[in-house]
Image (cartoon, rainbow, N blue to C red):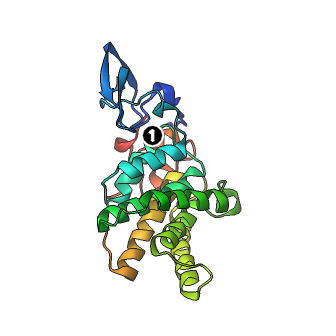
Amino acid sequence: MDIEVKNIEPESENFCLVCGNELIELDEPADLVCAFCGKTAQAKEVCVENHFVCEECSHLDAKQIVKVICLKSTKTDPIDLAKEIMASPAIKMHGPEHHFITPAVLLTVMANFTGEKQNLAEKIERAEEIAIKTAPTCSWHLGTCGAALGASIFLMIWKGLDPVEQSSWDEGNIIVANSLKRIAQLGSPRCCKRDTYIAIEETVEYLREKYNITLPVSEAKCNFSLRNRSCKREDCIYFNLKFALV
């Protein structure tokens, strides 16, 4: 049976900015803790998972939400953290924010994994700055993907590499090439979620081989198939409708 794949872009005011679930009005207002800033405020609605986002945080843009989630996270599994971030309806189905999500997630889980969390906020800010400057728009129409560049952004910041040095140049290009090769083998244009998963998985493998660092990484399953009219469904390795969010 053919399944109609729709492109659903929920309006963020009607859906939870944390998980994307529908908001439910409370019988009576209650003082709740904001899932983003941690401040207590009066809530009139929550989602089915009981997430509450205060008025101030409800106006955060996509990149601000990436930073807030990363800086609060204690996760060491980059796929798990990426899924948490991309589940927010503030993160569009396609868009250059994914070029920032890749290094932000990797910097966060490495900091949590090693316990070296000092200056994480500054490192994530630096990743955002580089991503905006080097990959401000999606480049699928040029036959490439900014999510792969995000892997190199992570590596340069994490290792403090100088791209004008030979070894740094080599590493940066290798990690991007590995990601782009697998994206070419497994994908097609117009799926930033899939390419983010691939770039993260290739970086995890590079860290294992090059630095003997083994991050815990869960199996990536797509939550977004029903929202993406460009979805390749069974032709994508991450496709599984039972995980899809309507």
Q: Is residue 2 visible?
A: no
Q: Nearer the viewer, residue 223 or 18?
A: 18
Q: Position of residue 58 (x, y in %)?
A: 48, 31
Total numbered labels placed on residues in the image: 1
Q: Which secondary structure lies at badge 1?
A: loop
Q: Quadrant of residue 35?
A: top left
Quarter containing the C terminus = top left
Q: Position of residue 120 (x, y in %)?
A: 42, 60
Q: Amino acid at mark 1?
A: Ser
Q: Nearer the viewer, residue 158 or 51?
A: 158
**As drawn, 212 above or below 220:** below
Q: Position of residue 170 (x, y in %)?
A: 56, 83
Q: Which residue is mark 1?
A: 88
Residue that protrudes farthest toward the top in the picture: 27
**As drawn, 43 above or below 1:** above
Q: Residue at x 52, y 43 (%)?
A: 91
Q: Residue at x 44, y 69 (%)?
A: 202
**As drawn, 69 above or below 168:** above
Tell me if mark 1 has few (under 14), some (14-19) or many (20+) residues whose alpha carbon lies within 10 angstroms of its own.
Answer: many
Q: Quadrant of residue 163?
A: bottom right
Q: Position of residue 45 (x, y in %)?
A: 37, 21
